[in-house]
Image: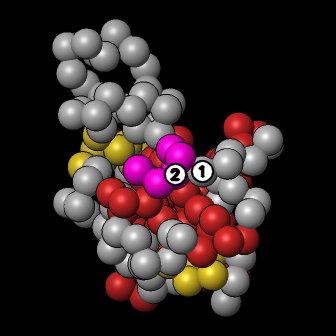
Amino acid sequence: MANINRFNGGFKGPFSNFYNAKCEYQGLAFKNSEAAFQAAKTLDGEERKKFLTLNPSEAKKLGRKIHLRADWEEVKYQVMLEVLKSKFQDPELRKLLLETGDDILIENTTGWHDNEWGDCECDKCKSVLGKNLLGKALMEIRTAIQEQADNN
């Protein structure tokens, strides 16, 4: 049976989008996966470029102010997969992800109550089942990396 691995968000770990690790998305190189993800919220190339040099907090803040693409809700999970695929091209990050084995990865978002991308365990949210989309995306990327290794 798989272990449950509740990783902290913020700047605390390599599985967080706030962790500084270079990431490419549609030909642009970002300083972190949060910036790449937030930039993908718009289809305007000039708006996207504003995210290139931002730290994760700045990117998240700007991501609330840009012109949101009409199909965002339909494509955001696929965008996250593409962003994470780029992030985990880094050999050290890839190794850390693979070392989780078959653990169930859950982003612990207690503190900012994100029950879409993670799972918050505070008193206010304890009755809400978090969707844990970031954890699911990480596990999907891990499986793809494992399958690729098995085929080589």
Of residues 31 and 53, the one drawn nearer to the viewer in this rendering: 53
Of residues 149 and 22, the one drawn nearer to the viewer in this rendering: 22
Residue 57's label in the rendered image is none
- Left or right: 143 with respect to 1? right
- Residue 98 location (% of width, % of height): 42, 71
Residue topped by disc 2:
63
- The quadrant holding residue 42 is bottom right
Q: Secondary structure at mark 2?
A: helix
Of residues 80 and 39, the one drawn nearer to the viewer in this rendering: 39
- Left or right: 112 with respect to 136? left
* Residue at 63%, 81% in the rendered image: 28
- The quadrant holding residue 148 is bottom right
Residue topped by disc 1:
66
Q: Which residues are magenta?
A: 61-65
Q: Majority secondary structure of the magenta segment?
A: helix
Residue 74 position (above or below residue 43): above
Q: Amino acid at mark 1?
A: Ile
Does any portion of residue 99 appear in the rendered image?
A: no
- Residue 118 location (% of width, % of height): 41, 38
Q: Amino acid at mark 2?
A: Gly
- Residue 122 location (% of width, % of height): 21, 21
Labels 2 & 1 near each other (Cβ < 8 A): yes
- Residue 150 location (% of width, % of height): 63, 79
* Residue at 47%, 40% in the rendered image: 117
Does any portion of residue 66 appear in the rendered image?
A: yes
Which quarter of the image is occupied by the C terminus?
bottom right
- 70 is within the stretch colored magenta: no
